[in-house]
Image (cartoon, rainbow, N blue to C red):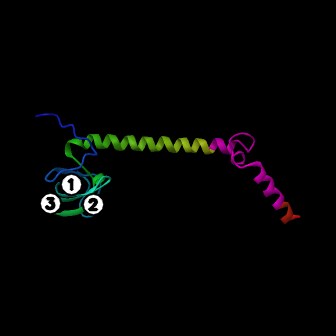
Amino acid sequence: MAKKTVDLDTPFRKNERVLTTRDLGPIGQGAEGIVQLQNGLGEWMRYWVLFDDGEQVGQVSHRDLVRPFQLQDWHRRQEEIAEAAEREANKAVAEVESAAGGGGGGGGGIADQIPADLLERSRAAKARLLG
């Protein structure tokens, strides 16, 4: 049999076997079923799925289903997404810490991002209110 080279983002076809990647109401994660109907366009693909226990669920998102032979690839992709999100969060924290540590004197703080004339106008307004 030829090796299956279907991408994870390839739409499911009618009568194709699928697994759930999360709980869908009464259907638990990992439940197997068969696609009964495909509808939607582009990013908004939805499916009606008849599960092995006889339960039928409609409007299931493409993100909530995976082909059984692609389950390992799906888990790998989820790990990559989580790692990328963690890297971005660490990068954002590092940027905030470096901006806060600058103290407004050329260190990339918020005061460096506000035009000097606006800062002066704000100082003058505060002086009028307080004085």
Q: Position of residue 131 (x, y in %)?
A: 89, 64
Pointer 1 residue: 31
Which image quarter: residue 22? bottom left
State how far apart marks 1 and 2 are (Cα). Answer: 10 Å
Magenta span includes 19:
no
Q: Residue furthest bottom?
A: 129
The disc label shown at residue 123, or none:
none
* Whether label 1 touches label 3, CB < 8 Å: yes
Q: CA distance from mark 1 to mark 3?
A: 9 Å
Report the amino acid beneath label 2.
Leu
73 vs 2, left or right, is right
Q: Is residue 116 magenta?
A: yes
Above or below 37: residue 75: above
Task: Say if mark 1 contacts mark 2, CB within 8 Å.
Answer: yes
Q: Which residue corresponds to mark 2?
A: 24
Query: SS at mark 2?
Result: loop
Decide if residue 121 is on the left or right side of residue 26.
right
- Residue tagged 3: 53
State the extent of the magenta-drawn residues as a range: 97-125
Residue 93 rendering spot, x and y as whole percentages: 57, 44
